[in-house]
Image (cartoon, coloured by chain):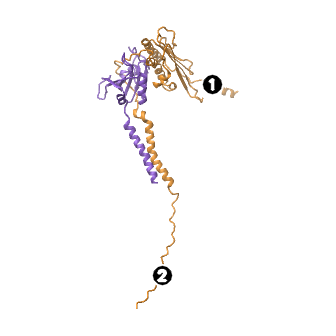
Amino acid sequence: MIRCVLIALLLAACVAAPAQAGVLSVDDATDLAQSLADAQEEQDVCYGWEITNNFDGTPDVGSSNKGPGVPLAEIDSSCSKGVVVLTGSIDYSCSSCEAEDSASVSIRSSGMDNPPTVGDLENLGLKAGDLTGDKDDTTLVNMVNALPLLAADRGNAPYVDYEPTAEIPPADHATGTPGSDLLRDSWIWIVLCVLLIAAGPIFYLHNRGQHKPARATPPRATPPSTPATTPTTPTPPAT
Amino acid sequence: MKRHAILAILLAGAGVVGLILVFTSHSSVRDDIAKTYRKVGTEKAPGKDGPQRKDTEIYASRKGVTQTARDISDEHKPADRRTTEAGAFLRYSDDIVSVVPPPQGSTGSRILVDDEEGGYNRNYFFVGGFWGTYSGPAGSFRGGGPGAGK
């Protein structure tokens, strides 16, 4: 009986996903829907996102014409140039399971001759796998925000105007240190070169150790040399 | 033994030469953009004046925003990036590169190269809250866009 209860608990622990809220907070989703609504106004293209997950049962959903939390209404008359929706799923594995976290995305579209693709998102450095990482919310915001840009890049709609910020609050500034560009670009070459530099002395010492005689041999005793004996012929006494 | 010593010296020497090449051949993203794209202008960078400040350099690319941003980031991996409906923004150690749509009536894309302060100020509604502080009215994320913050 106890064994059955333990097995049931173990199974429940495996099946149950970690307690976690959705990827985007309400504020994030509101801002995202607002930016899509601005894009829709300029492009006449409707946008949305629908990302399911296995950790709280509530998908991340929102749209340019209905706002956060509401899926895109595809029959909206303001979507005269088409509809683009980012769909996907995030699957977190339980800590005791062998499977790894995974995520996938796709782009559903209609009313467009040349719709954006997932490859376009990857060209911008936005990969589905990052939805399972620490920056899952930033990745999702970037992916959804990119849809109007991609639609315009493919000639389906005009670009959304870029307007630089005229003035920012004096207290606000960039934070964090991006790190060295040289190390980011060339770290693999630097590591290889350092390994080569280290390999030289290691190679030499290794070979010297192999060729070193195992023990010092005492000098071989040489037999005493016999002096060359030349027959001495007695010299005849001088007369 | 002498042969091994020569080989060891060659190995280490190749490493030293490689390191020298890596350090001397590396150019900044600002320099590479200047070599690759057509410069169309320069303007005073947003933010406070200072001796360390650099002007904003503006370039034109024949390719669209996505492809241009990809070309630049393939050549120089950014420390961080932000993609919005109005452009792609790449953050480097000293520079912020904004790849944005071309002026109306043109094709391709525009590239703005700013120092960190200039890039952050210029793109505050897009990168504020992501790459630095944001004391605007919304939450942690800025949707950006022309209507944001107005």
Of B117 and B12, the residue lying toward us: B12
Left-right relation of A92 to B33: right
Q: Can you identify the residue that label 1 sits on? A: A12
Chain A, chosen colour in render: orange
Of A143 and B130, the residue lying toward us: A143
In the image, which lettered chain appears purple? B
Q: Position of residue A42 (x, y in %)?
A: 42, 12
Q: Secondary structure at mark 1?
A: helix
Query: Which of the marked residues, 1 or 2, is nearer the chain's N terminus?
Result: 1
Q: Secondary structure at mark 2?
A: loop
Q: Amino acid at mark 1?
A: Ala
Which is more foreground, mark 1 or mark 2?
2
Q: Residue at x 36, y 28 (%)?
A: B36
What label sits on residue A231 in the rendered view?
2
Inter-mark Cα distance, 1 to 2 = 111 Å
Q: Position of residue A238 (x, y in %)?
A: 40, 90
Q: Residues within 10 Å of mark 2 (few under 14, many from 20)?
A: few
State whether residue B76 appears in this view: no
Left-right relation of B119 to A228: left
